[in-house]
Amino acid sequence: MLRRWTFAQRVGAGLSVCLLAGLILLATLVFAAHTLTVDDGALFHHVADILAGLLGLGALVALVMVLRNALGPMHAEAVQSEQRLHLFMDGVSDYALCFLEPDGTVSCWSTGAERLTGWTSSDIVGQRVEVLHVPDAVAHELPASHRERAARERRLQSEGWRLRKDGSRFWAETLLTALYAEGGTLQGFAEVTRDITERKRTERMQALLAEAGRVLQPQAGAKELGNALTRLCVPEIADACVLYLPDGQGVRPGAVACADAATQARLWEPLMRRPSQDEPGPARVMHTGRAERFAEVDPDRLPSSVSDSTCAELWRALGVRSALSVPLVVDNRVLGALCLLSTRPHRHYGAVDQAFIEELSARAALALDNARLLAATQNALELIGVAAHDLGTPLSSLQLRLRRVRLQCAPADAQDPRLREGLLLAEDETKRLGQLVHNLLDLSRLSGGRLVLEARPMDLAELAHEVAARHEDQAAAAGCALTVHARSAARGRWDRQRLDRVLTNLVSNALKFGRGQPVEVHVNVDEHSHRVQMSVRDHGAGIPAEAQQRLFTRFERVTTDSRAPGFGLGLYIVRQLVEAHGGTIRVHSRPGEGSEFTVELPFTQEAQEETGNVIRA
């Protein structure tokens, strides 16, 4: 039972017993001494009293021994526990441990807290914990609010800026635990703090890289990419950001972003001064391809290497405290330089920041290079489109002239068929060339987003018969019987010219790869689904299953017959034009059984206006 007593209860019980025994012993000895002084012959009569006194003395000695044996270990245990507590607080160096009074006064301060904040125990003990918080938090009474919540909820975990003794800041993760006595009285708080600045910085940088993947799209163009890149860095990792690009005379600012709009207006004058390659900054970074970092800068006393350079005026205007310049490199080519400037006392660029910014600049450089290539491709496609458009008129004229010459000079009943066959082949080649020119023209318009559908009321069955009539000579030359199956009219609103191109490509392919076998064109109307279905079927060699997945890809050819001309654009154009009408196209084919291409189009297009829709590939 004694082991369940607290240390204070044990001490109190021991003292009470000692006091009682001492009183009994004192009373006995006083009585015996008084009797002996009065009557010298009464020694024998007071033997009992003397024995009682001796017994009391023995009891007192025994009690002292008991207290020594019982309380000694408890005292040693208390001393050892206190030593362990001090060792624990002094040994944990990665965390700041401290105890607070209920009003927020610091009562105990660990070695880890001293290492983390710079405050020693003699400096901080007795002060309010508010000295560790930034002024904004103190102004909003955030420390007191945290203590109130911790007292109510028993514990509170939070994150925020904390101050060191030298005035620098760090991002802290804090666990505040309320300490209650057995009676429920609040005794104070235990606070555990950890510096997670680097972890927080890493998380922000990773989020920044993820955002960069979304923002830095080459379709935006080089100028838009530069503006997006600088806006991405401000104010998350910089107070001002400048993207420098090369030109014929050195470097020039391509995009600028600043946290303060008024300051940004004053930046352009110093930015327009062109630095030399020997000066620190963007020009030297672009020349050497190596990053430059100024971790800590005193605005009043700039580094000697910068004080006389063109960057000095810019740095003084901003009050720069840290600067980082990294090159934008792709395939050993430097496309520009990204300069980050910090004006906050607590934001200094270190090696970790440099590594992340170099990764960001690498992605930005790749996006800029892709934007350049995309612009060059668009220019080439525009050139192709102009050339195809200019070739279309003379090709049409040439086809008409060849047809007229064939009809006049080489009729079907001519004795020598060689002239007629030659003219037919020449006419067929001009048709193929014309089809290729039209495909290139459509490719240019699709890639440039300039293809406009001109929807008009039309009949797909009538169009199918017209396309079949134009391919009679080609079908006869290929030995194919070309037939059209249309039970009724298929009326709707479509772009007749584009659907003519769709059917022409499909019928030409069927005649090309289904030589000697029938080719069938079917047009069916489904009134329930409000869709028209067109199919072109041949009975040729067919298409392997693995090739059908890439059949509608640009510049993709699945035939191994070198005699079949083409650039792999026809079916790609067909798919783009069909999808532009809101339709779908699919292929069903088995080797040796031929191929069937099926196009489904909605024939009720009330939402499609006369002016047409702009299609972007």
Image (cartoon, rainbow, N blue to C red):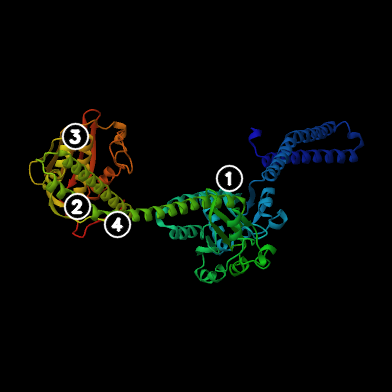
Q: Residue furthest right?
A: 40
Q: Which comes before the other along the chain, label 3 or label 1?
A: 1
Q: Which comes before the other along the chain, label 1 or label 4?
A: 1
- Structural distance between the alpha carbons of marks 4 and 2: 16 Å
Label 2 is placed on what type of residue? Gln
Residue that appears at 77% across and 41% down = 23
**Viewer-side label of 2, 1:** 2
- Structural distance between the alpha carbons of marks 2 and 3: 24 Å
Label 3 sits on residue? 538
- Structural distance between the alpha carbons of marks 1 and 4: 80 Å
Label 1 is placed on what type of residue? Glu
Q: Which comes before the other along the chain, label 4 or label 3?
A: 4
Residue at disc 1, secondary structure = loop
Label 2 sits on residue? 497
**Viewer-side label of 3, 1:** 3
Label 1 sits on residue? 182
Q: Position of residue 70 (x, y in %)?
A: 73, 34
Residues packed near mark 2 inside 10 Å, few (<14), some (14 to 19) or many (20 plus):
few
Residues packed near mark 1 inside 10 Å, few (<14), some (14 to 19) or many (20 plus):
few
Q: In which quadrant is the N terminus drawn?
A: top right
Label 4 is placed on what type of residue? Arg
Which of these two is toward me, 541 or 429?
429
Q: Which comes before the other along the chain, label 2 or label 3?
A: 2
